[in-house]
Image (spheres, rainbow, N blue to C red):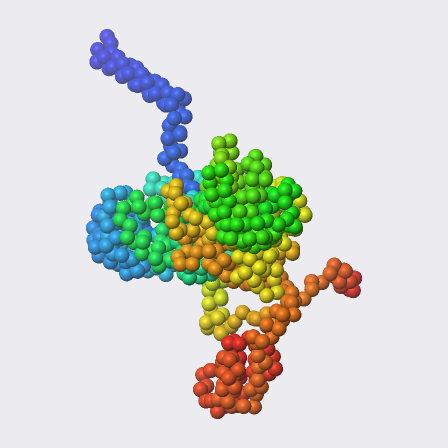
Amino acid sequence: MTDPIKVNYKKRVIILFAIWCCVLLALGVRLGWIMLVDGEEYSNRAVAQQTKDTELAANRGYIYDRNMKELAVNAPTYTVWVRPSELKEKGGRPGKMANLIASAMNGDPVQIAKSLQKESSLVRVAKNLDSDQADKIRKYIKDGRLPGVSIDESTRRYYPYGDFASCVIGHINDDGNGVAGLELFYNTYLSGMPGRVIRNTDSSGRPLFNGTERYYESENGLNLVLTIDEVLQHYLDTTLEEAYKETESNATMGICMNIETGEILAMGYYPSYDLNEPRIPTEEKELEAYEELETDEERVQYWNKMWRNFMVSDTYEPGSTFKLITTAIALEEGLTSTAESFFCDGAYQLYTDTFTCRYHGAETLTQALENSCNIVAITLGLRIGATKYYEYLDTLGFSGITRIDLPSETSAIMYNPEKMVPGELAAMTYGQGIAVTPIQLITAVAAIANGGDLVRPHVVAEVRDDDGQVIYKNNTDPVRKIFSEETSKEMCKIMQSVVDYGTGKNGYIPGYKIGGKTGTADAVIDGHYAAGKVFASFVAIAPSDDPQIITLIIADNPKGAHNAGTVVVPFVRDYLEDALTYLQVEPQYTDAEKQAIATSSVSVTNCTGHTVAEATQMLQAQGLKPVVTPNNNSDTSLEVVDQYPKAGDKAKSGSYVYIYTE
Amino acid sequence: MDNRRPSDKTRLNKALEADMAEARKNRARRRIRNRNRRIMFRSLFLAGIVLVVGLAFLAYGSQINYRINETEANIAKIQNEIENLNVEIAANSSPEIIEKKAMEELGMEYPNASQYIYLDRASKDDVQTAKSDD
């Protein structure tokens, strides 16, 4: 007899076994499902959780002047961050912490306290700290006095010369992208490509020791080498500042360009701003005006105006400087010659319009430009005719843009040639009724004076990589030929006589041949000519027998004396004096000029052997300034053993003479 | 002793010999055991020393590693300072600052016209002559 208990037992075991098998099978199927069907999804999620993909910032390219002086660089900087939630968790006291941080970096504790309590997960407390300030704060963090606060190292853009060629270089915003000037125009070249690092991390995001790592290197941005010369730029900036202050203009601006290649050697605008603090104007009056602005809207408007490059993005009516173009066209078309004589009686009647001018009487073509005669300009313009005139304006680049490598270039504003009336053409011949950008004007006059070639003005000479290899070079070949060599030579002679005998007299520099043309044009404000407001300008070529550089300076609304001859020309002369010396152009003095120099300097008397007191008296009697070296010795009875300049050498009146005691 | 039967004697002797043999074996075993223990202790001792020395090396190694890391961090920090100083140098080389320092602190002046000497650049021929002179 079988044991009933055993049979039941056996059955139960079998049943349990069967159930167990089913469960295992189910698990097996589930496992297979997870691995085969959902496998990819899960492994992707695991990878995402276990790896950290960090971006490696690329270094922004540097900007250099033509002699490789650094104008825009990157400097390592420290930024202070806070996680307000962590701060609260760890029981930090925002007030005390803010005072601590403020004391370490000379900051505003109220502002810092606000940042520490903001409702965000991550807040930037302060940026652009130097390493000493960062060290102090790091110590506080280590001591546990700043919970939730961390310091991050990054780089910032720095402009070593501060307020220098600001309208050309421009600046970047907090995201590292250019906002104005070259930083904007060449932003793609300068930015480079960020790299990536992909690493295995643990649950708190720290990289694993033995994990795999994939490293994609960042590509640094490319560097710009400009055509700008820092010395010429400095001379121009100084001149513009002086002109602004003396003439009380709204603004002064200038361009100095290589007349053959279109390389811009200097371009400045005053009042300006420090590129390291681009929101704050540097000039006193402007700063006052800025601080009075109340709404953000007003401020944004102010900044946009400050960051705009007038010479490229805004137009002005050029006035009489445009007569150069009218005359050149007439000469080129054979419609006049330097031998022709004209008569100016002060008025020109054209149908219903009367154009006035100063009374000049009988004058040759050259004299007409020396006098800046409107009547002659109108006469020539009518001979040329609207169609031909506009053809030349087109080839000279006024109907388009010069394609200078600066952002937001705009084009000239001209009458529609098909709807124009003769009176409007007449006004254009002497530069009113047409509005051009300063860069267009200087390029057109350059085409007249350099032998007839239109060049493309540009600010960047080369784009280079970090190894110095040239990646891109700006073409310096002329764009097209417009005037013949003959016309150009004649125009240069005419411009020379404007400075020798005409409205440009104040531009005379002994030893140098300067040519130019003045222009005093009524300003247009809101579509009307504004009474009493002018743009005074002077465009100059040097040396006029073989022009190398062309300079244009414009004063926006000078107060007091208006005409360019007194207001702008002397500053152009000051600039050219310094510039031509720097460019090592040798002066050729006429006998009369040599004489004048001789009388303005004295032959230094012999001081050696005399006492300091005697030597000082003698030198002062000569109109010189004695300087005693070493000057910590105030004993005036010491004997003079040496001097510079030596006895008998020429020294300019009012200059220093060094006398040496033992 | 002679009272005992001869078979008893041999049995005794055998037992004695067996005992003695066993004692000998035991002694030998003990000796081996002791020797094994000694070997084990000695090798453990050696192993211990090797371990300690190894640990010492490791400690030294990680200490050096730590110093390396520290030095590298220092290097990076100093590189940053160098870069910042370079920037300061560049900032102080602006023509404006140089002009100001030269004129105000050193009493220098721009030379006047009569103090310039103009030299003609060497012509190409001069340069070639110089080359062939070596």
In the depicted view, which residue is nearer to us: A220 or A640? A640
Residue A197 percent coordinates (x, y): 45, 41
Is residue A205 positioned above or below A546 on the image? above
Q: Quadrant of the C terminus of chain B?
A: bottom right
Image label count: 0
In the depicted view, which residue is nearer to us: A352 or A647? A352
Residue A558 percent coordinates (x, y): 41, 56
In the depicted view, which residue is nearer to us: B125 or A146? B125
- Asked if residue A140 can be seen in this view, the reply is no
Residue lying at the far top of the rendered structure: A1
Residue, x 56% and y 43% (percent of image)? A379
Residue, x 58% and y 86% (percent of image)? A606
- Asked if residue A296 can be seen in this view, the reply is yes
Q: Position of B106 compared to A207: left or right?
A: right
Residue, x 46% and y 56% (percent of image)? A563
In the depicted view, which residue is nearer to us: A458 or A101? A458
Residue A232 percent coordinates (x, y): 53, 58
Is residue A209 positioned above or below A605 on the image? above
Residue A104 percent coordinates (x, y): 30, 60
Residue, x 58% and y 43% (percent of image)? A380
Q: Which quadrant holds residue A134?
A: bottom left
